[in-house]
Image (tube, grey):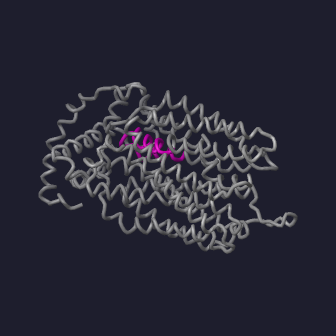
Amino acid sequence: MFGHLKLRKTFNRSLFTTVMLIAVSQFNFGFDQQGFNSTQAMDAFERQFGWYNPQKKVYYLESWWLSLFAGLPYIGFGIGILIGSSVSKRFGRRMCMFSMSVWSCIATTVIMTSKSRDQILAARILAYIYIGMELAVVPIYQSEITPQCARGFVVGTYQLSLAVGGLVVNVVARGTGSLNSSAAYLIPYGLFYLVPLIVIAGIWFVPESPRWLAMQGRNEEALIALTRLREGKFTEDEIAAEMAHVRAGIDREVEKGKFKDMFHGKQMTKRTMSVIGVNFFMQATGSIFASVYGAIFVKQLGFINPFTVTIITSIINIFMCLCAMVLLDKMGRRNVIFFGGSIQTAGLFAMGGLGLTQNPSVPVKSAIVAMMIVMTTGFTLGWAPTSHVLSAEIPSMRLRDITYRTASVVNIAMQFTIAFTLPYLLNAPYANLGSKVGLIFGSIGFLSLVFVYLCVPECKGRTLEEIHTLFEMEVPLRKFQKMDLSRMDAHVSSHKQDVETGSDIVVALHVGGKD
């Protein structure tokens, strides 16, 4: 299954440890997203933070407050993207991961001590600053340390870790959901401390991104870091050649890393719009319906335990993430995102069509839930992992941070828009569309497939420097995979002698064998 990735021939202990630590850091996004998705459907949560209906003698959450609770955290998300991208670019990938983890511990303390609606809302906004910083650094860090043959696999762990974190917190919520005290939701929230403490303890024991070091002009340190990530699996000549490719890529670029440079010239504009479009459609196709409101929606249907559905969905998502991680470097980015997006679009249209049924029976309600799971399955296979890979691969090296930051702001703006409007679309006395929202998102899903066909390049098996060259050569996006770049070697050869000299420094320092 993983043979084409050559993992045994690619991963030494240092690279494996670094990838695993970064992957663990992503669990917290799953904890947060699915933790609040599940706990807001708990009776104990509704009693603490909801309103009392004296006629029905039940506590409930107002649609307008759910809208704020799901939408306003993306303000923190956006702030986190800006902070994380700036810290990552100026101080390094490791410092960004360390600082975001410290912040997460502070925000979690505010969550755990919340007693009012205003405090829990403010706490979630603060917590999303961490999530934004994580999104700003993790895919870029992963793409910069991993050989091209496994880059799709490794960056795909972003969505896998989110799914694993979601499964863990959903299982915990399933066990605590019946408790009558605040422990029902506080126990799942307590998981938010675990991951940041692990990252704080371990991040300084893994190498910094060699590409980031090279961009700072710290070439000797970059070679040492790259050697730590490759020794034992690659020869000194291969390490020197990779370092030469990195330096050549940096030297060829004339961009200064300013916002306007992302739209300087036809090819740079094409790269920028590809990344922005991927992030737009990732959220515009409606995944938030299931990830943020899924538990409440299923609870309103009233025929199955919503926590059981969230667990089933999480298990399926993990399996689909594993499939995507393998397929991204085997089938390619375009094929995976098109296949997964087609499944998602079909699920959305089917769910929306079933919602047209008046007074739906239990079988119809079951089919609606099933189609919601199908929609999520397609998203987890297609848009979810592939968007992060493409967003890290397509931008030019000097503009990678600012391009990723800009695209992430678009991503967040769409998440905010959809999360904020969904309660009004779903519930009475507003639009009261229920599952018919699938018809809206399904239509957008169809447009997303057209975008993929026309505007998404195939980056499978390419180094980041080769991708840059393909754009410089103005190769049509649909022909990226077929282009022969063997002539690029001559362009790089002039750098190799300098890097080989640098490799002697590594040997003298006895870096070998010290992961």
Segment tinted magenta in the rendering: 384-410
* Left or right, residue 375 beside residue 322: right
Kindly report the secondary structure that dominates the magenta region of the rendered protein: helix
Q: Nearer the viewer, residue 187 or 29?
A: 187
Q: Quadrant of the N terminus?
A: top left
Of all residues, the one furthest to the front in this rendering is 363
Q: Quadrant of residue 91?
A: bottom left
> Residue 310 appears at what percent x and percent y?
60, 55
> Residue 341 appears at what percent x and percent y?
54, 36
Q: Nearer the viewer, residue 448 or 136?
A: 448
Residue 1 versus residue 480 in the image, above or below: below
> Residue 203 appears at what percent x and percent y?
36, 63
Q: Quadrant of residue 449?
A: top right
Q: Residue at x 33, y 40 (%)?
A: 464
Q: Is residue 393 magenta?
A: yes
* Left or right, residue 173 beside residue 495: right
Q: Residue at x 60, y 46 (%)?
A: 373
Q: Is residue 312 magenta?
A: no
Q: Residue at x 73, y 69 (%)?
A: 47
Q: Nearer the viewer, residue 247 or 160?
A: 160
> Residue 292 appears at what percent x and percent y?
62, 53
Q: Nearer the viewer, residue 387 or 298?
A: 298
